[in-house]
Image (cartoon, rainbow, N blue to C red):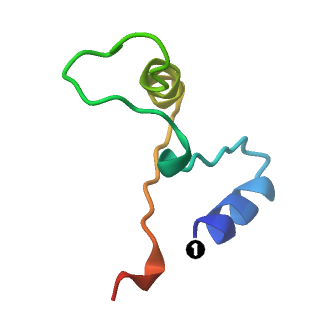
Amino acid sequence: MLDLVIEAFKGLDITTSSVRLAQLNIKPGVTSDEGDGDDWPALRKQIMDADILILGTPGDLI
């Protein structure tokens, strides 16, 4: 479904990106940077810089 949304946005000349959280090293914690190897700070910046955030989950959960 997200691929369809990204494809539709391309027709409107909107820049998009897709991130798969399972492929990142997001360390547990309560700060915005949990130290070396934490991918959260870069992802957080990407989210904060975005005008739109669309979240998706796997469709085969049913």
**Image: 3 above or below 50:** below
Q: Compare residues 32 and 4 and report the one nearer the observer.
A: 32
Give the residue at x 38% y 10%.
35
- Outermost residue toward the left? 30
| Between 35 and 55, the one nearer to me in the picture | 35
Image quarter in which the N terminus is found = bottom right
Give the class, few, some or many, for how many residues have Cα within 10 Å of label 1's Cα (few <14, many ≥20). few
How many badges with numbers are in the image? 1
Residue at coordinates 46% horizontally, 11% vertically from top-left?
36
At a point 56% along the width and 46% down the height, the residue shown is 23
Q: In this view, does 31 lie to the left or right of 3?
A: left
Q: Residue at x 52, y 21 (%)?
A: 42
Q: Which residue is label 1 attached to?
A: 1
User: In the rendering, at what x and y percent does residue 25 appear?
Assistant: 47, 33
Query: Against 60, is 58 above or below?
Result: above
Horizontal side, residue 58 vs residue 20: left or right: left
Residue furthest front in the image: 36
Of 3 and 31, nearer the camera is 31
Helix, strand or loop at label 1? It is: loop
**Placement of the C terminus among the 4 image quadrants:** bottom left
Instruction: Please name whichever residue, 52 or 41, is drawn nearer the observer in this view of the structure.
Output: 41
Q: Where is residue 27 in the image (x, y as percent from the top left)?
A: 34, 28
Residue 58 drawn at (x, y percent): 46, 72
The spot of residue 30 in percent (x, y) is 19, 21
The amino acid on which the numbered mark 1 sits, given as a three-letter code, is: Met
